[in-house]
Image: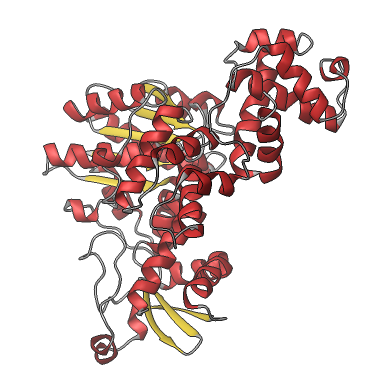
């Protein structure tokens, strides 16, 4: 395998291990310069990124490269300028991550980020894959999708700011960047940039160090559209909040569009200044939930099509039924499945059952009444039903109680208040927490998944 393919495959693995903002910040312009025996040289556009990548992600990158090369490698992190023009010409073309023209062959980096206003879509930092053509719309995200479409028609006028919030991996970044792509398609002359809150803060720190704050302000305050991901990360950073407050006001007062994402509602972000909370709530705040079954199935079908994976429809249905988590984990688990059975021409139902440790012949969950469900959970965990519905907070009882709540909600679709009554008169917020916790664990914790699957087989 040549170095280009090695790095492409390594980047695919890294995508599953880090957040989109981290992936874009550290790896968007990284290239595998050369391999010499078991020494792999990776180049970054400047010493700042090279140093941070080595300190924070050395082990992660090494593990991925070791798997690709089947060697115990040592990594060398450099900047582009350490290679002469002659060496660069001898090397094969670098592997760009986003825009094929975005990585110069002989870049002369500076010690910290530079600041210049965006001049064209190629400098917007938008990922080419994050467009509406690859965005699946379902019950979990249709309101946020509709709001984004409205913003595209009237940037700066309809919903400003548009604040998109939700848990990890539910598609906030994808929707935000798809909106950015669509805005530029309709208005190519607009100046737009996408950055993470961490990048905004790093740019500010670098500007202070270089005494180029005016250039920093020009970069962010002369935009037509500003997209900032994970805005919650400026919370508690006094100077970053101060600068963003003035940036926000400068854009808002001139009718420029602002789109933000966060893992929480504005009012629930700890250590976020009240004046910023007020401004965030001045537009429209919409949430994206974990995808429902239909959306999960559509995501899997799209992913299988993109990767040209032949999989039986029943197997796909079982996968969508079993993995009830966020989009990132769904794609990660599906990639694990395809890697495990890559020798097969077609992935069938038995393969998926084997992957999840299921023994039943179908992936369908039969409906039962709540008494039977509670009884089966109690029997599995070898506890009395009265203890399951009682007041004790012993660890094994709490786990069984959470699993019972999950089954009552997921398989019987009972209201939270009703589940709380069945499980000893508990508050609906406690039930909601239990269901959310087990939902996350079901796709990430093999033991919990095995326990629930075993209980379901008794239906």
Residue 142 figure quarter: top left
From the viewer's side, name the closer residue of 168 and 382.
382
- Which residue is at a point 47% across and 73% down the rendered structure image? 68
- Which residue is at a point 28% across and 28% down the rendered structure image? 148
Residue 284 figure quarter: top left
Side (left or right) of 123 relative to 241: left
Q: How many marks?
A: 0
Classify 128 as above or below 94: above
From the viewer's side, name the closer residue of 130 and 377.
377
Specify the farthest residue to the front: 361
Whether residue 14 is visible to the viewer of this picture, yes or no, is yes
Coloration of the structure image = secondary structure
Q: Assign the C terminus to one quadrant of the image.
A: top right
Whether residue 201 is visible to the viewer of this picture, yes or no, is no
- Which residue is at a point 41% across and 60% down the rendered structure image? 12
Classify 77 as above or below 23: below
Relative image position of residue 439 (x, y in whole percent) = 60, 32
Side (left or right) of 222 relative to 9: left
- Which residue is at a point 25% across and 38% down the rendered structure image? 132
Classify 91 as above or below 412: below
Relative image position of residue 438 (x, y in whole percent) = 65, 32
Q: Assign the N terminus to one quadrant of the image.
A: bottom left
Relative image position of residue 339 (x, y in whole percent) = 47, 59
From the viewer's side, name the closer residue of 446 and 216.
446
Relative image position of residue 32 (x, y in whole percent) = 38, 76
Side (left or right) of 2 relative to 343: left
């Amino acid at each position: 395998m040549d170095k280009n393919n090695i790095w492409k495959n390594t980047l695919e693995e890294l995508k599953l291990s880090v957040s989109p903002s981290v992936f874009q910040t550290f790896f968007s312009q990284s290239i595998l310069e050369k391999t010499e025996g078991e020494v792999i040289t990776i180049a970054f556009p400047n010493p700042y990124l090279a140093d941070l990548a080595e300190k924070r992600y050395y082990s992660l990158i090494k593990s991925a490269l070791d798997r690709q090369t089947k060697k115990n490698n040592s990594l060398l992190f450099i900047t582009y300028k350490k290679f002469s023009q002659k060496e660069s010409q001898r090397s094969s073309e670098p592997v760009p991550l986003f825009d094929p023209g975005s990585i110069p062959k002989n870049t002369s980096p500076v010690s910290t980020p530079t600041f210049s206003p965006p001049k064209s879509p190629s400098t917007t930092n938008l990922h080419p894959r994050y467009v509406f053509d690859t965005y699946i719309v379902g019950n979990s995200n249709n309101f946020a999708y509709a709001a984004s479409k409205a913003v595209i028609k009237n940037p700066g006028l309809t919903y400003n700011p548009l604040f998109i919030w939700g848990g990890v991996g539910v598609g906030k970044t994808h929707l935000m960047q798809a909106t950015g792509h669509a805005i530029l398609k309709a208005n190519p002359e607009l100046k737009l940039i996408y950055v993470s809150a961490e990048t905004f803060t790093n740019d500010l720190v670098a500007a202070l160090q270089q005494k180029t704050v005016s250039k920093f302000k020009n970069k962010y305050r002369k935009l037509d559209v500003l997209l900032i991901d994970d805005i919650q990360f400026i919370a508690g950073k006094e100077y970053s909040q101060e600068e963003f407050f003035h940036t926000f006001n400068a854009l808002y007062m001139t009718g420029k569009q602002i789109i933000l994402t966060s893992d929480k509602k504005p009012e629930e972000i700890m250590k976020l200044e009240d004046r910023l909370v007020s401004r965030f709530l001045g537009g429209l705040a919409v949430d994206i939930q974990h995808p429902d079954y239909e959306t999960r199935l559509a995501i899997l079908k799209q992913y299988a099509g993109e990767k040209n994976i032949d999989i039986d429809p029943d197997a796909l249905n079982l996968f969508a039924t079993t993995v009830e988590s966020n989009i990132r984990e769904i794609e990660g688990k599906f990639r694990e499945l395809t890697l495990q059975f890559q020798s097969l021409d077609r992935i069938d139902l038995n393969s998926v059952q084997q992957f999840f440790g299921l023994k039943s012949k179908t992936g369908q969950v039969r409906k039962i009444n709540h008494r039977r469900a509670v009884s089966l959970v109690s029997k599995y965990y070898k506890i009395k039903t009265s203890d399951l519905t009682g007041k004790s907070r012993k660890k094994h009882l709490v786990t069984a109680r959470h699993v019972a709540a999950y089954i009552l909600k997921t398989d019987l679709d009972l209201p939270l208040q009703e589940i709380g009554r069945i499980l000893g008169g508990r508050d609906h917020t406690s039930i909601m927490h239990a269901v959310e916790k087990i939902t996350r664990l079901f796709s990430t914790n093999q033991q919990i998944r095995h326990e629930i699957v075993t209980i379901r087989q008794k239906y």
